[in-house]
Amino acid sequence: MATSTPSLSGVSGSGTSTQFNAQQFVAQIIASEQGPEQLMQQQVTNFSTQATALSTISTQLQSLQTAVFALDDFQGALAAKVATSSNTSVATATAAAGAVTGTHSLTVANLATVSSGSSNVLADGNTTFATGTLSIQVGSGAATNITVDSTNNTLNGIASAINAANAGVTASVISDANGSRLAVVSNTTGAPGDLTITDTSGLGLVKNVTGVNANYTLDGVSLASASNNVTGALSGVTLNLAGTSSSPATIAVNPDTAQATTVIQNFVTAYNTVITGLNQQFTFNAQTNAEGPLGSDSTVRQLQQQLLGDAAFSVAGNSGFTNLAAIGVNMNEDGTLSVDSSTLNASMASNYNAVVNLFQQVTPSGLAANFNNDLLTMTDPIAGPLAVDQNGISQSITALNQQITDFQNNLDSQEQQLMQIYSQVAVTLQQMPLMQSQIQSQLASA
């Protein structure tokens, strides 16, 4: 390494003393040698900025991948159904993704009931009554027999005994202005939960409500259910019976267009985030007089082009719904997308299946599957182009940091050597006035 040595202009003399700061002099020499190190440090900064930008793009792509997967999920939002009732006092309904679109007629003759019983009224929960036996049977199951003796012949005591026996009922003590009584409620609704009670004690427990099944007519077919929450009558639909009716209520099962609109909008938002970020890399900044940190990165440019191509993907036929523009998702001049809500709503209303098929067509692949396949390649943590790009930058940063370390070590060594040299110079310069005086004295006495 060539060393640039500054002049000794800092040395001054008055004939009696000479001032020379060796440390300052050496510092000037070392500072003049730091140009290459500063250049490498700037390169590290530039690479770090690029790495951060790539990391941001990678994160945005992962968000886009999540949004695209939602469009490609056969059991997801595009498959979601919504069930509505024309008379919610008769029934409400919910629909799962597998429900079949259609309308159904429902008439409810009677609701399912829960069998229950109660005892005689006593003064309070701790009042005793005559001992005996108590038998409780739920539906066609085995009866549970409970011995009523001095350990449990109070309302509180027998309630605890019944609950501990796991008889298929729930016992509790209820009180009002007239006193307290035991209430027993079946844990099973409808006829299967109907109670048979036999009581020989002084409790006086009897059945008050008979458990019966709900009876209803669905699309002209008479049906029964032990529960008012009916599953299985309509595939994927749960009917929640609420009341009886003389005229039928209409249960309608339709695609959940609200969920569909949400996932399409989520996709557009995630896509626009990525495209906007990529566009910024290639936009000239008048203040910095340069493009973004990845403006010269060919990998990022190819990524941009591939995403634009994925968004412009089209399928054949499909009742005319061949691409995003056909359903109201339009590409702007900068490559971002915008949703025409009116066109999208009209598309889903006219042919919802075709809209879904645009994204989820199996053979050949629809837009979502095609997009997702490309995103899997883009975001591959090992072989993906962004991962390879980031790895290359990381290696460059590592190499530069090592070069900076080596360069600085060399400077430190050079600084030590120069300090040894110029410290001696400083000592010599400090001795010069004395030497000059001695010479002058010798000359004067000669």
Image (tube, rainbow, N blue to C red):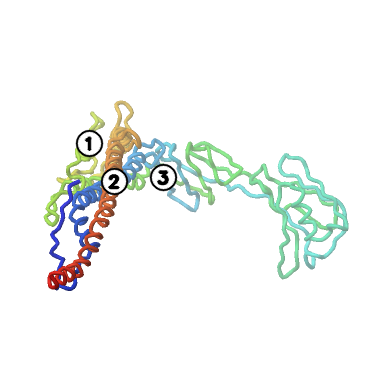
Nearest the viewer among 138 and 309 is 309
Distance from disc 1 to disc 3, alpha carbons, whole Å, reads 36 Å
Q: Of the numbered discs in the image, which one, if any, rests on residue 406?
A: 2
Residue 414 at x, y = what percent?
A: 25, 51
Residue to which mark 3 is pinned: 82
Front-most of residues 167 and 190: 167
From this viewpoint, is residue 317 visible? yes
Vertical comparison of 321 with 53: above or below: above
| Relative to 43, residue 419 above or below | below
- Is residue 226 positioned above or below 160 on the image? above
Residue type at mark 1 is Gln
Provide the secondary structure element on which disc 2 rests: helix
Numbered marks: total: 3
Q: In this rendered view, identify the residue nearer to me: 376 or 324.
A: 376
- Residue 99 lies, in percent from the top left, at 44, 38
Can you identify the residue that label 1 sits on?
306
Earlier sequence position, callout 1 versus callout 2: 1
Residue found at x 48% / y 43%: 106
Q: Do the residues labelled 3 and 2 touch (CB within 8 Å)?
A: no
Mark 1 to mark 2: distance in Å?
42 Å
- Indicate the position of residue 187 as horizontal and vertical percent values: 67, 48
- Mark 2, other Cα within 10 Å: few <14 / some 14–19 / many ≥20: few
Q: In this view, does 416 lie to the left or right of 230?
A: left
